[in-house]
Each structure stands twice: as C-alpha cells, then as structure tokens.
Amino acid sequence: MRVLITSGGTTERIDDVRGISNFATGSLGKITAEQFLQAGHEVFLLASETAILPEAAENLTIIHITTTDSLVKNMEKLVPEVDAVVHTMAVSDYQPVFMTALSNFSDDFSKDDLLHFSAEKVRKISSNSDFQLMLLKKTPKVISYIKKWNPQVQLFGFKLLAGVSEQELVDVAQKSLVKNQADFIIANDLENITKTQHEALLISFDRIVKMHTKLEIAQSILEKAQEAYHG
Amino acid sequence: MRVLITSGGTTERIDDVRGISNFATGSLGKITAEQFLQAGHEVFLLASETAILPEAAENLTIIHITTTDSLVKNMEKLVPEVDAVVHTMAVSDYQPVFMTALSNFSDDFSKDDLLHFSAEKVRKISSNSDFQLMLLKKTPKVISYIKKWNPQVQLFGFKLLAGVSEQELVDVAQKSLVKNQADFIIANDLENITKTQHEALLISFDRIVKMHTKLEIAQSILEKAQEAYHG
C-alpha cells in the first residue's frame, strides 16, 4: 500500500521575517509513518520544517511543506498516486491579506476600506507604530479536495476542538465525514491531549472507536487502512 | 567569562493552536555559542523550541524561550550574572491584542472601537468567518533593558534591515548604539544573507568591521568580548 501522511503545522507568511504558524509537533504523523513503514508500506510524508521526523528509511519519502498553498500543490500531485491519505497536519485556517500600521487608516473607517485597502508590499514591516492592523482571509479547506483528486483513496481526516462534550466531537466529526467524503475522522479535544495521553475518537459512518494514546491512534489507522486495501 | 546568548525567534500566541513566529533558525546563535565554549567560557543559551542547538557541553546551559515575555523574564534573572550578552534572537515586534471575525464589527467603525474592542477569549478561534481582523500592539524592546539590568555587561545587539544601503545600515546601527547603550551592533540586510554567506557590519562608536560569514561574525564577537573582559 502507498500512503500519504501530512504532519506538523503550516505557516502563512506576513512578511519575509514573520508568519502565522499552527502549533503542531508532528509527533502523531511521525508515529503513524513508523507504523505504516514497519508493516511494509510505502510512505510519503509531507511535513513542516519544524516537525519531528521518523528516521530515514528506504520506503519513506519526506517533502517539506511551509504554506497551505505548498501543501495543496504537493498533495494535488501525490494524492492520485496513493491508496490512503492520513491528514494529521494542522493547516492554517486563515492567511494574512495585509498587516499595516493602524495610523494608515483615518479615525473612522468602514469594512469596505479594510477589504479594499492596498498595502505596500515590504520585506520587513517597520516597528515604528504602536499598533498594527491585520486582515486575514480563509484558506482553502485542503481536506475537501482530497476525494476530488482521487475518489478511490481511503481518507483519514482530523478534527481538533477545544473544551467540548464527546457528543459535540461526534456531531462535528460526522458532519466532516459527509462534507469531505472522508472514510474516517479522528476527533480530538485539546484539553485531552498531554505529553503521554491523547484521547481521540475514530469515527466512521457505522462505528466509533475510542483511543487513548498516539500509538493507539496510529495503530487503529493502519488497521483500518489495511482492511480497506485488502477489501 | 560568562556569556548569555539569545537565539532563534520568539512566538506570540494568537490562541492555543496558533501564533505569530519570527523566522530564525538559530544557526548564528549556535555557532556563536560554540566559539565561546571552545574558548573555555561559560554559555547560557536562551533559544526558541525550534532553534538549531549546539551539542550538549559541560559549560553550556540551554533554556527554552517562547514569547517575548518569557525572554524578558529569563534575561532579567541572568543578565546581572554575566559578563557579555549576545542578543541574536529575532524578537517579535508586535503581539496580538485580539483576533476576531470581521463580522463582529458594524459596517462603519472607528479606531476607538478597535482599541476598546473586548474579544471573547477562546482556546481555538472558529474558522466559520470568511475574514478575521487582528489588532497587534508593540512588544517591549528587550535590548533597551539589558544595560539597565547590568550597566557593566558588554552588549552585542543586532539590527536586521531589508534592501537598504550600507550607509543606512550604519546610521541605524549607530542610533541603536546610543539608544540601547550597546557596545556593538551587528547590522545586516536580509538580501545579503544566504545559506553560505552572511554579510554583516560590526559597528561600535569608533570602528566598523566587515564580516562575510556566520563563523566570521561569531569569531569577531568572541574577540571583542575577550578584549573587553581582559580590559
């Protein structure tokens, strides 16, 4: 089986010296890659520069990702070539349109002023002003493209929430299954993730499996992917 | 001699899953630490989580830094204990005050509305809205505190600009010498930094030394710090 795993977090540039990053260590992606490699599968790992990586191996290809756009470009090429996609990467929900000194606006302004503001492109935004204003726009939802690029691929998506009930986790995951034509959504809550524990639910249309560690999550994904691959 | 080296870039949190990071690999901080260690000095390295680190050594203490605030707290404790400070870290110029859906504002609003907006604290900002607005305020200028914490310390500051003339680099560095009571400012331009080259000027009140690689920069800093230490 050939599997594509995304890992770590994307970064959206503000200027040449700073950007908005999603905090994600890539440890779940690393463990998942190791499980697939140990089972003899071929792994393509799309990982952020700061993600923790598995050791080099013959069946492992690592590609470094920075922005959501670079993730989309690389996935578009690779998704049609693989049997399963495990999309653990924390993708930026928003990307900066501009960041500029608040003093560039008059005292009263409108949403239209903001949406049509044309900011001067600079390599490094000056630190002279006391306040800066940043407008951000939604990034493309990468998970929604995957089945369009390859309708046959087994898709494992992730949904991270914060401080919600188990029922809400399940509801949100089930909506994501439908919306993104995912085969499985792993739903988890920030409040139930520590260094040693990682509570999560593996949700498909007919089942919910509870998992308690990253290793259990990785093993469950491997098991489900193999079942689907062998029909 | 005891030297404090800051390295990498700080990150300012937006919420529990994302933040604004300064891109900095920490490679100059690493090389500088290695030069001081090889010369038999004691090194305190304040480095971001993603910074490249020197190998563990007996005379090396590494402390991990995330935000500008955590950098200030750690430096306040350590600066009075050391003979020299090499402040290579790319510190965030701005930190988020809030990030909220643009739809939370009426069509017309004022700067006062922005400055007094009270955003609900959430662990993870929802991705439902098409646009978000972020207000950012200036962070404290860490370099300006160092001589206040320890008037005797030898201070090596850095100034990174983008696409300016050598004269402007010198002017900005000389202003920083005065403003921050620095002994040396290493001035460099983003456009003259590549993987193998790092053009920089070591500027003091009476001299300018040109350097072309990170190793040269580190060696010049060590040399100047030793001269000052031995009187």
Image (cartoon, coloured by chain):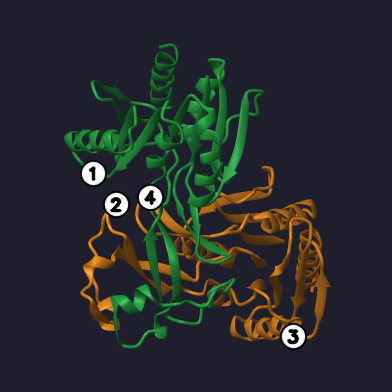
Chain colours: A orange, B green
The residue located at (34%, 27%) in the rendering is B183
Which of the numbered marks, if any, corresponds to residue A123? Answer: 2
Q: Are marks 3 and 4 in contact (CB under 8 Å)?
A: no
CA distance for labels 3 and 4: 42 Å
Label 4, residues with CA under 10 Å away: few <14, some 14-19, many ≥20:
some
* Pointer 1 residue: B163
Image height of A16 relative to B189, above or below: below
Identify residue type, mark 1. Gly
Q: Is residue A48 left or right of residue B103?
A: right
- Same chain for the residues at labels 1 and 4, yes or no? no
Q: Chain of mark 2?
A: A
Q: What is the CA distance from the residue labelled 3 to the residue labelled 1?
A: 54 Å
Residue hosting label 3: A167
Amino acid at circle 2: Arg
Q: Position of residue A122 (x, y in %)?
A: 26, 55
C-alpha separation, residue under disc 2 versus residue under disc 1: 8 Å
B195 over A110 or under it: above or below: above
Q: Are marks 3 and 2 on the same chain?
A: yes
SS label for mark 3: helix
- Kindly identify which residue carries mark 4: A17
Please tell me which residue is depicted at 57% across the width and 59% down the height of the picture: A23
Q: Earlier in the sequence, mark 4 or mark 2?
A: 4
Residue A58 visible in the snapshot: yes
The chain letter under disc 1 is B
- Residue B136, given in percent of the width and then of the height, sits at 39, 64
Residue contact between numbered discs 4 and 2, judged by CB atoms under 8 Å: yes
